[in-house]
Amino acid sequence: MTATASRTTTDYSIAVLTPSNIERPATPEAVAVVLGRASEAGQAVIPWGAGTKQRQGNAPRAYDVALDVSGMNELLEYEPADLVVTVQAGVTLAALQARLAESGQFLPLDPPYAQRATIGGTLATNASGPSRLLHGTARDLVIGLRVATPQGEIVKSGGKVVKNVVGYDLNKLHVGGMGTAGVIVEATFKVHPLPAAQATIAATFQQLATAHAAAGRITRSFLYPRAVDLVRNIDGKGTSTGWTVLTWSAGSPATVDRQARDVAQWCSEGGATHVERLDGEAHDAVWASVIESGRDEPGAMALVKLSCLPSQLPALIAEVDRHAGSSPPVPLVAHAGNGVVYVRLPGATLETVRRIAAATHELGGSAILEDAPDALKAQVDAWDPSGLAARRRDDFDLMRAIKTQFDPNSTLNPGRFVAGI
C-alpha cells in the first residue's frame, strides 16, 4: 500500500519563516542521516507530513530544513488474525483505514483532517476525536514505534505484539511530543474489528443544564457508547441557543438498537424537545461536521481547546459565553465524557482568548490556542494563553531536561512545544 499525502499548503513556510532546504528522505535511515547532519551543523529541522497540524503550537525560533516524510508511505506488516498493523509515518490515516476495512477492521482514531493527515503527524500531536471516549487516544493504540533521533540513530520502543513489556514506555514520550525528541518513522498499532452496525441518537435541549444531565446519564451508564458529545451551532450559522446531545452507538445490530432505544428514552425523560435516530449517510455526516468543526479555514479564526472535569462543563461553558459575548453564540463542541471542549471564536481578540484561558485554569482545567490568525498567535504562547500554567506547574524544568537529553542542540521544532521546548 502506498498513500502519498496531499499538501495542504503551497510551500513549507510556517508563520513568516521559510526553510532554506527541503529534504525528502525515502527511508527511516535516511531520515536519521538528515537529522544527524543538521544537528552537527546547528540547523533547525521541522518535520512535515501532510501539513495539516503545522498551525498547532508556537512558531519555531528557527527553521532551516523542512523534513518531508510523506514519501515514506508503506504498509510494512499486517496480520489481521493478530489485530496488529505496522506502517510508515507518511501513510495517511484514510489510506490505512481503507486497507484495514478490507479485512473487516479499523483503527479507532477519528481526528480532524483524517482524509489527508499522515500517521506521523497524527501521532506527533496525539490528535483524536469523539471516539476517544470508548477507545482512547493514539497513546492508547500505539504498541510500538521506530524513531529517528538528532544523533543520527534509529531507536525502537514497545513491540509488535499487543502484550509486551519492553523497558521504559517511550512511546508516550513521542506520541503528543510534537516531534521535539525525535521523528516518528514507523508505528505499530493494535486495531479493532469493524462494528457491524452504527447509529446516532440526536436529542435537542433548550437548556445546557438538562442537556448536560442527559449526557452525563448516558456516559455513566452500562451502554458504553462510542461517543457522547454536546454541540451548539457547529456550522457557525445558527441563531439558536439550544443544545444537541449526540450519542454514537456501535456494535452488533441488536446492541445498537438497544443503545438507541435506551438513549432516546432517557433524553425524552430528561426534557429533550426533539429526538431522532440517524443512520447511514446521516450518521456519517453529523460526526464529520463535529470532527471538522472550526477547521474549514485554517488560520481564519481562533480555535481554542479547553479541558476540565466533565462535571464542570456547564461552569466552563458559562465562562466561555461570558467572555466571548457573541450573538449568535459561539460554535462549541464538548466531549461530555472527558471534558474536552473546542470553541471557535470569530473575531476574537487577545484579551478574549486570555480571559477564557484564565477562567478555564480557575476551574482546574487547561487551555490551548490550537489555531488563530498569525497576528494573534504571534502575541501569545499557544500552550499557555493565560500565562497561568507557567506559574502553577512544576514540571517544566523536567521537560526541558528531557529535551536536552534527547535533542541537545535543539535541532527539532525549536520553541514550538510547551515551555518553549
Image (tube, grey):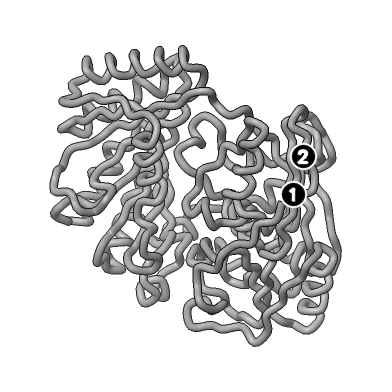
Which residue is pictured at 35% across the width and 25% down the height?
216
Looking at the picture, how far across and down is residue 240, in whole percent?
Answer: 14, 43
Q: Which mark is residue 376?
A: none
What residue did someone put label 1 on? Answer: 75
| In the rendered image, the vertical position of residue 262 relative to residue 125, given as above or below | above
Kindly identify the residue that appears in the image at 42 percent across and 75 percent down: 378
User: Mark 1 is on which residue type?
Assistant: Leu
* Marks 2 and 1 in Cβ contact (< 8 Å): yes
Residue 151 in sight in this render? no
Q: Decide: few, some or many residues near mark 2? Use Cα within 10 Å; few <14, some 14-19, many ≥20.
A: some
Say which amino acid is labelled 2. Tyr
**At x 81% / y 68%, what residue is drawn?**
32
Quarter of the C terminus within the rendering? bottom right
Establish if 357 lies above or below 157: below
- State the image quarter where residue 272 is shown: top left
What is the number of the mark on residue 78? 2
39 lies left or right of 206: right
